[in-house]
Image: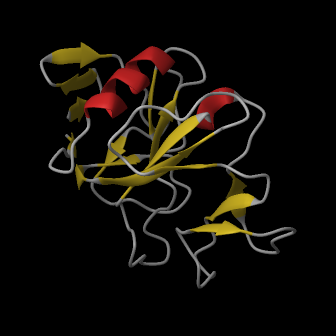
Amino acid sequence: MVVTRWGARFMGRRFPVAIGRGGMTDDKREGDGATPRGAWRLVGGSFRADRLAHPASPLELSAIGPMDIWSDDPADPAYNHGLRTHNYPLSHEKMRMTAPLYDVVLFSDWNYPDATPGKGSAIFVHQWRKPRHPTAGCLAFASKDLRWIIQRWTPRSRIIVR
């Protein structure tokens, strides 16, 4: 999949895509709101089993639970990793949110699994809030487009952000 600020191309189709509010960057920093340029792999994901059936995908997807979080604190030894915990004292993102953004969320290998503190966390692929509404650095698609993409994703597929 090739992603530019104007859209995404994958398997002969074009899709509108939302990128980070900070645009695209070659120097990703935690909290800059930018989408990092480069080549990424998708390494898995999660979905809201209370809202939808297990999505058809060759990617390994697990159900999001009420205690699932993603650490975004550069001082956290678990920085840029998912955890299942309650009342976590460090900065994190709750994976189970009211908005449908993470009804299906795919995890990229940006700064993962060996995370460098401050180089960006939680660079996901997920459903957009509304058409082309900026993200915090992730890639976001219309729900129907995201489902189409994940059904056809392969272990050899890559995201190339230009």
Compared across the picture, whether 117 is left or right of 69 comes to: left
Q: Tell me the colour scheme of the image.
A: secondary structure
The percent coordinates of residue 124 (x first, y second) are 46, 47
Residue at the image point whose x is 50% and y is 61% from the top: 121
Front residue of 2/49: it is 49
Residue at the image point whose x is 39% and y is 69% from the top: 112
Q: Residue furthest right?
A: 87
Q: Residue furthest bottom?
A: 77
Residue at the image point whose x is 49% and y is 77% from the top: 117
Whether residue 40 is situated above or below residue 105 in the rendered picture:
below
Image quarter for residue 18? Answer: top left
Could one spot residue 98 in this view of the protein?
A: yes
Image quarter for residue 70? Answer: bottom right
Whether residue 101 is situated above or below residue 22 in the rendered picture:
above
Compared across the picture, whether 145 is left or right of 3 comes to: right
The percent coordinates of residue 102 (x first, y second) are 60, 38
Front residue of 69/154: it is 154
Classify the position of the N terminus by image quarter.
top left
Whether residue 9 is situated above or below residue 41 in the rendered picture:
above
Count the marks: 0
The percent coordinates of residue 154 (x first, y second) are 21, 43
Residue at the image point whose x is 35% and y is 60% from the top: 110
The percent coordinates of residue 142 (x first, y second) are 47, 18
Could one spot residue 17 in this view of the protein?
A: no
Classify the position of the C terminus by image quarter.
top left
